[in-house]
Image (cartoon, rainbow, N blue to C red):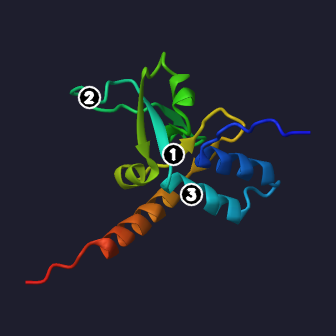
Amino acid sequence: MTEAPTENVPDLQQALKDATANRTDEGFLQDDVTNVLNAFLNSPVYVASSEDPQGEQGTNLLMVQDNEGNALPVLFTTPEAAGEHKEQAPHVVQTNGITLVQSLKDVGVVLDPMSDHQFLIPAEQMGSMRSFVEERLAEAEPTQED
């Protein structure tokens, strides 16, 4: 018997699905959270915007609210998932996790909202990742010698 061909699932989406499959009553396993965060930093992500990113307004991200009323940008692992929200946000923009970590200040994000593998990255975790990325970028910059 031959196996059915597997769908080409983006790394970030696969990490989200794996984390969800392993989730316990206590929450996500630390190894799975680490895998999701690493995949997020190293993967393309898609945002849905109500404004044309090439226009004067720039990108206006689709947002949801958490249980405490805080606005959270929503990010998607595929352009098709982002495109499902075209009534509210007709423009789909590809970016990457590192760029978003550097540009979104004091806010968390929701990955693939309303899916079985939805995942929240809290603002505190985004801040920690920003510090990590900035440290690595500073280490990678060549030193200026006079």
Question: Eyeballing the image, is 110 above or below 85?
Answer: below
What's the amino acid at mark 2? Gln
The foreground one among 66 and 111 is 111
User: Is label 2 in a helix, a strand or a loop?
Assistant: loop
Mark 3 nearby-residue class (10 Å; few <14, some 14–19, many ≥20): many
For marks 2 and 1, the one nearer the N-term is 2
The foreground one among 56 and 65 is 56
Tell me the residue that label 3 is attached to.
37
Q: CA distance from mark 2 to mark 1?
A: 23 Å
**Quadrant occupied by the C terminus:** bottom left
The residue positioned farthest toward the right in the image shown: 1
**Quadrant occupied by the N terminus:** top right
Q: CA distance from mark 3 to mark 2?
A: 29 Å
Q: How many tags in the picture?
A: 3
Frontmost of labels 2 and 1 is 2
Tell me the residue that label 2 is attached to.
54
- In the rendered image, residue 140, in percent from the top left (x then y), is placed at 32, 72
Asked whether residue 72 appears in the rendered view, the answer is no
Q: Disc number at residue 109?
A: 1
Q: CA distance from mark 1 to mark 3?
A: 12 Å
Q: Residue at x 33, y 32 (%)?
A: 59
Image position of 33 (left or right of 43): right
Image position of 118 (left or right of 27): left
The foreground one among 2 and 27 is 2
- In the rendered image, residue 104, in percent from the top left (x then y), is placed at 38, 49
